[in-house]
């Protein structure tokens, strides 16, 4: 049950949708997230009232095509699965949204089953096994 937030600069609705699809497909393929488990916040910043700041860090050259992907998900996946997820997101962002892999910045924030409610004031995940 990941919650995905994608922020980019100057994207239209089609590019935002393509980026959302890329991230969701990568989650399904690499972590076994169910196909119908999509919760996303997709935001295009206009450069005037919403800005994105970035520098070149760890030898990666970024430009204004940068895409920040923040994923909150249940804990329990190892480094190899996370590496596969990062790689697949970058591949699909390039394929679906013409985004250079060097401009795809991904962060994961993990939490536990009791930290989620998908509605009705209930903690539904307390009774479900971790996918993947």
Image (cartoon, rainbow, N blue to C red):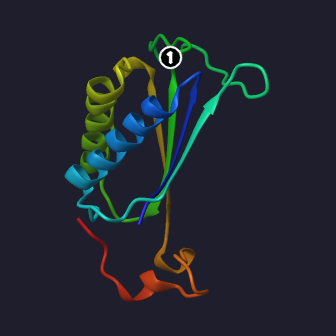
Dot 1 alpha-carbon crowd within 10 angstroms: few under 14, some 14 to 19, many 20 or more: some
Is residue 113 depicted above or below 61 in this figure? Answer: below
- Determine the residue positioned at 51% across, 21% down: 66
Which element is circle 1 on? loop
Q: Is residue 113 left or right of residue 95?
A: right
Badge count:
1
- Determine the residue positioned at 44% across, 29% down: 15
The N terminus - image quarter? bottom left
- Determine the residue positioned at 36% across, 17% down: 100
Is residue 29 depicted above or below 73 in this figure? Answer: above
* Camera-nearest residue between 62 and 11: 11
Residue under numbered circle 1: 65
Q: Residue furthest right?
A: 49
- Determine the residue positioned at 53% across, 80% down: 114
Question: Residue 52: x percent and y percent?
Answer: 66, 25
The C terminus - image quarter? bottom left
């Amino acid at each position: 049950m990941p919650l995905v937030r994608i922020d980019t600069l100057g994207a239209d609705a089609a590019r935002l949708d393509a980026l959302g699809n890329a991230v969701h497909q990568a989650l399904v393929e690499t972590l076994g997230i169910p196909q119908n488990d999509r919760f996303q916040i997709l935001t295009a910043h206009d450069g005037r009232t919403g800005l994105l700041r970035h520098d070149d860090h760890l030898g990666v050259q970024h430009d204004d095509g940068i895409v920040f992907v923040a994923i909150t998900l249940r804990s329990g996946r190892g480094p190899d699965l996370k590496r596969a997820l990062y790689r697949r997101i970058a591949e699909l962002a390039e394929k679906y949204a013409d985004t250079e892999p060097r401009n795809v910045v991904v962060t994961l924030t993990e939490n536990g089953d009791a930290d989620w409610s998908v509605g009705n004031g209930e903690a539904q995940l307390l009774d479900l096994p971790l996918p993947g």
